[in-house]
Image (spheres, rainbow, N blue to C red):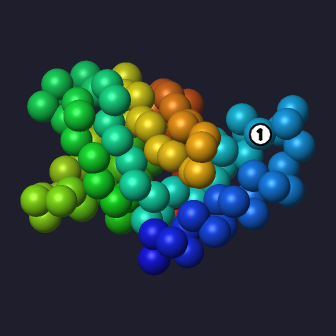
């Protein structure tokens, strides 16, 4: 599934103009993305990485390598994911208004 997501992101990045790239990434589907929590107001989540399996308006639900299921708050958090050579940093505060539909 993660490989399919990488294909989706590659296509998205190829078809998006540079001026629209930031808005495109904020609106991209991040389900099955491998995400690293670079910073979090809940310090125990800082450094956690995993596959994003659930998104709510306020959290990302990850499954980590040790099969734990942390729900990381978006607010006051920084998330990093990578697509090819691009390392993308998302500010959780910009993501809290997204309607997840879940």
Residue 23 in the figure: left or right of residue 99: right
Residue 97 in the figure: left or right of residue 72: right
Residue located at (28% from left, 47% from top) = 49
Q: Nearer the viewer, residue 79 or 56?
A: 79
Element type at mark 1: helix
Q: Nearer the viewer, residue 86 or 24?
A: 86
Q: Quadrant of residue 72?
A: top left
Tell me how many marks there are.
Answer: 1
Residue identifier under label 1 = 21
Query: Measured from the top left, where is residue 17 in percent x and y?
Result: 89, 43
Residue 57 in the figure: left or right of residue 15: left
Residue located at (34% from left, 29% from top) = 38
Query: Measured from the top left, where is residue 35 in percent x and y?
Result: 39, 48
Residue at the far front: name it.
Answer: 85
Quadrant showing the C terminus = bottom left
92, above or below 81, in the image: above
Residue 102 visible, this orientation = no
Q: Quadrant of residue 15?
A: bottom right
Residue located at (87% from left, 33% from top) = 19
Query: Measured from the top left, where is residue 78 in percent x and y?
Result: 41, 29
Residue 39 visible, this orientation = yes
Quadrant showing the N terminus = bottom left
Residue located at (54% from left, 37% from top) = 87
74, above or below 10, in the image: above
Q: Residues within 10 Å of mark 1 (few under 14, many from 20)?
A: some
46, above or below 26, in the image: above
Query: Measured from the top left, where is residue 101 in percent x and y?
Result: 52, 64
Q: Quadrant of residue 42?
A: top left
């Amino acid at each position: 599934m993660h490989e399919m997501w990488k294909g989706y992101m590659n296509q998205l990045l190829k078809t998006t103009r540079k001026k629209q790239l930031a808005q495109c990434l904020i609106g991209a589907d991040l389900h099955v993305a491998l995400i690293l929590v670079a910073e979090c107001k809940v310090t125990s989540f800082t450094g956690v990485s995993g596959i994003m399996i659930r998104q709510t308006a306020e959290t990302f639900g990850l499954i980590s390598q040790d099969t734990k299921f942390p729900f990381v708050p978006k607010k006051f958090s920084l998330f990093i994911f990578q697509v090819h050579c691009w390392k993308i940093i998302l500010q959780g505060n910009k993501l809290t208004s997204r309607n997840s539909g879940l």
